[in-house]
Amino acid sequence: MRVRPARAPACTFPGRPAVAGHGDPSATRTSRDAARGAVSTVGWCLSESNEVGSSHPLMRTLAAIRKAKITVREIILAPLELDDFLANSSPTRCTASGNGLSLWPRLCTRRPAAIHSLRTSFSALWPRKDSSGSIRGWAAWNWDLERIRAKGHTDNIVDLMIGKLNRLSAVTREVLKRLACLGNDAEAATLSLVHEASEDEIHSALWDAVRAGVVFRWDDAYAFPHDRIQEAAYALVSEAERAAVHLRIGRLLARHTSDEKLEEMIFEIVNQLNRSVALFTTIEEREQVAELNLIAGDRARLAIAYDSSLVYLATGEALLSEDCWERCYALAFAMQLKRAECEFLTGELATAEERLSTLSARSATRLAESTRDVHC
């Protein structure tokens, strides 16, 4: 069953702003337009309340929208219940064998009846002719529950998606792995860079994935339609090689990003490198990544994402060596000062005051040493 989203009007009038709705938190392109004032109202429908954290692009975008003085209204929706789904799908779930209601509880036994989960679960049964009967000769769906149970189909949506991904070609799976490592979406140019292939080769490799509904394509970018699909694609990367893959991607992004575009790409770069800190081999690289975390932390702070800012700043500080106050005083000082500011803004007043007192003492000591050197 395919649900077509309602289309926004082609033009807007005073008092009738365009409304954009997203069924998944990974869709943030329209939200960026909202932050610039191009779209007046944006809505999201999250299937689970824990799908996003403070560092998720959606949360950063919402912070930017609020900072732009745009009204944000949150409506909390409960998960879709089985009865709701049955009522919605009643015109299509007729069956010749009279067991029309029996299959749906089977597909919803261990999770809320999310539309995407049900569709994936049902499509996993359809290609197997011994599980769901052909509709030839019948004007209805027909299935054999005993054969379905005997097959042992998993209730885990990620496992179902992994099975679907494994039916794609090896070349397609490799590109999907890179896309999953980058996040929920990426430009074809970025995929071309991290996969070290031409954009034409990227489009060719992902064509079957688009046809299978594993990814969406718009213009020259690709996106997973649901976080669970991204999670399944990421699971194809073995845990043993994940850190190395993220390090390679992070280095490639950093190397090919100009100074003018660094702040624009900073989160994409830092989020890759921070997943591979154990593989840094030199103090110089650790200090470089610490400086990138400082930039990311400052950008998150300006977007009012103080918790995310503290995470970046703490990560950057942990990368510095014990003698950082001698090696890179300015970097260490800026890291501590920004942390104190975010702690103050998040209500951690005692921690912020203690950090600022330590910084003040260090500044006084450095000033005294500098003065002594001048007199000498």
Image: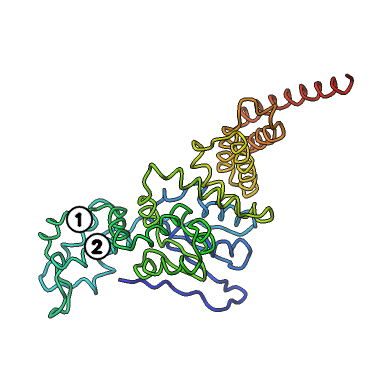
Residue in view at x 45 percent, y 52 percent: 181
Of residues 371 and 311, the one drawn nearer to the viewer in this rendering: 371
Residue in view at x 63 percent, y 65 percent: 37
Across and down, in percent, residue 18 comes to: 55, 71
Three-letter amino acid code at the position of disc 1: His
Across and down, in percent, residue 85 comes to: 28, 64
Image height check: is 293 above or below 116?
Answer: above
Upstream in sequence: badge 1 or badge 2: 2
In the picture, measured across the screen, residue 69 lies left or right of residue 49, that is right
Residue labelled with disc 1: 153
Three-letter amino acid code at the position of disc 2: Ala
| Quadrant showing the N terminus | bottom left
Q: How is the image coloured?
A: rainbow
Which mark, by number, is residue 124? Answer: 2
Tell me whether circle 1 and circle 2 mark residues in contact (CB < 8 Å).
yes
Report crowding for label 1: few under 14, some 14 to 19, many 20 or more residues within 10 A (C-alpha).
some
In the picture, measured across the screen, residue 348 lies left or right of residue 149, that is right
Q: Toward which corner of the image does residue 312 lie, by quadrant?
A: top right
Q: CA distance from mark 1 to mark 2?
A: 8 Å
Across and down, in percent, residue 326 comes to: 70, 27
Report crowding for label 2: few under 14, some 14 to 19, many 20 or more residues within 10 A (C-alpha).
some
Q: Toward which corner of the image does residue 80 lie, by quadrant?
A: bottom left
Image height check: is 78 above or below 5?
Answer: above
Labels in figure, total: 2
